[in-house]
Image (cartoon, helix red, strand yellow):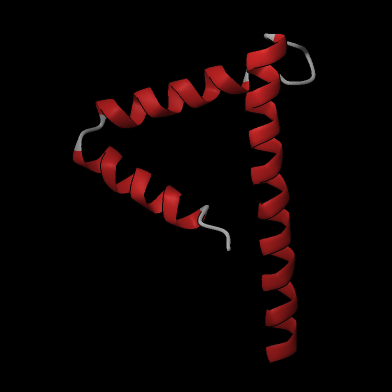
Amino acid sequence: MDNAIKLVNSFVSGLSSIFVGLLGLGVVAGLVFGDVAIIGGVVDNITALVSGLGESGLVGLIVAIILIRLLDIK
């Protein structure tokens, strides 16, 4: 059972690492090439997320801290 949990944890960690890398690539590509169909407005989505969290006050700050902690991949 412990081996299965380690396997799932390793898979999820690797998958989230790939998505964080793709997110960074999408931001850079969106800034360089503009809004391309494959990229799909990553910068606009991040801007909307940050704006929504900013309007939420303390709850937005707590969610931002949780998201930063979840994305803190070592």
Residue placed at 64% from the left, 35% from the top? 24
Above or below residue 7? Residue 36 is: above
Residue 44 occupies which quadrant of the picture?
Answer: top right
| Residue that sits furthest to the left in the current view | 58
Above or below residue 67? Residue 52 is: above
Dividing the image into 4 quarters, which one contains the C terminus? bottom right
Q: Nearer the viewer, residue 43 or 8?
A: 43
Dividing the image into 4 quarters, which one contains the N terminus? bottom right
- Residue 30: image location, x then y, percent: 66, 17
Q: Is residue 69 left or right of residue 33?
A: left
Residue placed at 75% from the left, 77% from the top? 7
Above or below residue 45? Residue 13 is: below
Residue 11 occupies which quadrant of the picture?
Answer: bottom right
Above or below residue 68? Residue 25 is: above
Q: Is residue 13 left or right of residue 52?
A: right
| Residue that sits furthest to the right in the current view | 38
Q: Is residue 53 left or right of residue 9?
A: left
Q: Is residue 71 visible?
A: yes
- Residue 17: image location, x then y, percent: 68, 53
The tally of labels here is 0
Q: Is residue 38 left or right of residue 47?
A: right
Residue placed at 43% from the left, 49% from the top? 68
Residue 12 occupies which quadrant of the picture?
Answer: bottom right
